[in-house]
Amino acid sequence: MSNLNLKAQAQNTYDAIVIGSGASGGWAAKELCENGLKTLVLERGRMVRHIEDYPTASKAPWEFEFRGTVPIEKRSGIGAARWGREETMHWALAEDEQPYIEEKPFRWFRGYHVGGKSLLWARGTQRWSDFDLEGPARDGYAVDWPIRYKDLEPWYKHVETFVGFCGSKDGLDVLPDQIVQPGFELSCVEKYYSEQLKKIYGDRYLIQGRCAHLTDPQEIHKQQGRNKCQHQNMCNRGCIYGGYFSANAATLPWAEKTGNLTVRPDSVVESIIYEEEKGKAIGVRIIDRLTKEAMEFYSKIIFVNASTINTNAILLNSKSSRFPNGLGNDNGLMGKFMACHNYRGKGYATFEGFLDQATEGRHPGHAYVPRFRNVYKQETDFLRGYAIGMSGSRRIDSDTSGIGHQLRDNLLNRKYGVWGMAAWMQGEVVPIESNHMRLSESETDKYGIPKIVMSVEWTENDDKMTEDFLQQQYEMYERMGFTNIDVSDSGAPPGSDIHEMGGVRMGKDPKTSLLNKHNQLHACPNVFVTDGACMTSTSTQNPTLMFMTLTARAANYAVEELKKMNL
């Protein structure tokens, strides 16, 4: 029997295990496999293969039975508030899959399938600058990042070259230029806004949004089998062209070509196995989603990329006599200092000019105003700042009055209305200790794993920042001649942005952080965390490029440490 156990263990042993198959997990797999490591990727959801498993990609509205509306009986048992239309219903999560406890209101969007949220993200991507990385040290909230822009720059280039981004080079110190292909052209009203913004304020800029779409595919992208973005703007269905970046279209197939990749879907990770005698993690325990069978896999290094909240949960549930409060959690800070982005502020206004112009077609991006508050000095009564997403387009009015031939003629002869300009804030949320997640001591899910308790709320700083956005956005609209101005606080709860971060933050001191500058657990160095859980602060930029960059950097460091036999 012991020989059988040894044989089974050998069959389940790899050089590396990656938990999660999304944007950061895919990058971990790519880098580790390219460096010759036999790598197992564990994904709790179902298998999704690029192209063949995008059932609604490129379908026209009339190809759906009810034009995309899903009958109530088909929505029963599905938590599909966000993905409740037929075009995206295949991404919806069953209500009983992973219920969580909201101690305070929180929205948690998940992507439980191979590729994770890399198939569902908004694809906005910007580099961080030292203004972002030095924020905590400057104002004393959270802890200082153990890295700076110079540590990230070569890895930004590495990731950007492979992924393919479009946008503009703007020469702004607050938003470093990056490797980009031609961006999506601004509309005439966006160009007007950009010109007036710079003229009136001097230090505020509206630029092309940078996003993970191919507009001029390079050889590296052709080798991936990806093609130019077709501007269908149906991205969340899955893109058969590979026009936008996803783990399914890019990193996972690239890793598979090495012959070193094994992907195991339907693998709900229960915990990481820590061996006292060796003083390191040796593997991962899973529960098969379909059979409920418990299994163990073993490896030399482990990358935890399960998406922020689940990464925290897995580590907290990885208990041993050495780590009674969770793997690496000697200081008791794991799960604390959770943060996200503040999207509460919204704005809209109309513009009477440019009535001789209109846009045709679609594009999947938007314009972007980088942060302009508290950049060079503290100038407001709130900490940090916010970026603004903007989109200007001309309204097309449809007259739906009448019936029969009159209604048909009205719908076929739509008329252009005025130009409109939408705005939404993306504010930096300052992490505080009381905003946290933890594991329930009394309730478990259907796999027998403790339920997650979310206890995160907005702070006075978030309220003040939202109010400042509303005031500033109203003023900007007004000074530029816009009319029918409407700015409001949506009151949306934390998590609505889908940018959860923190809980296993990086830092210099093991007393105040969980990870070092290479994303290793201070107390268990062969475990790396490189998804949103590792974030020390949130900045105002979309975070996914940061996750991928930190992952590529940490994976290559892990390979070098393995070669030196340090792990």
Image: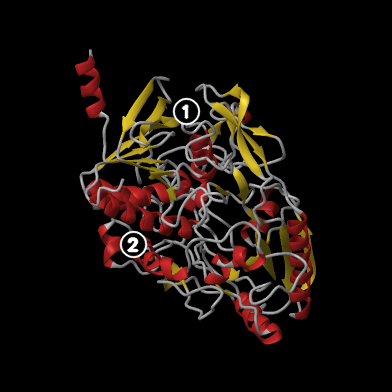
Graded by Cα atoms within 10 Å as few (under 14), some (14 to 19) or many (20 or more), the crowding at tag 1 reads few
In the figure, is residue 503 to the left or right of 461? left
Please report the residue visible at 49 percent of the width from the left and 58 percent of the height from the top: 123
Q: Which of 100 and 565 is in front in this view?
A: 565
Tell me the residue that label 2 is attached to. 162
Q: Which of 317 and 255 is in front in this view?
A: 317
User: Number of labelled discs?
Assistant: 2
Callout 2 touching callout 1 (CB < 8 Å): no
Q: Nearer the viewer, mark 2 or mark 1?
A: 1
Q: Quadrant of residue 439?
A: top right
Q: What residue type is labelled 2?
A: Phe
Circle on res. 415: none
| Residue at 61 percent of width and 78 percent of height | 205
* Residue tagged 1: 321
**In this picture, is 376 found above or below 214?**
below
Q: What residue type is labelled 1?
A: Ser
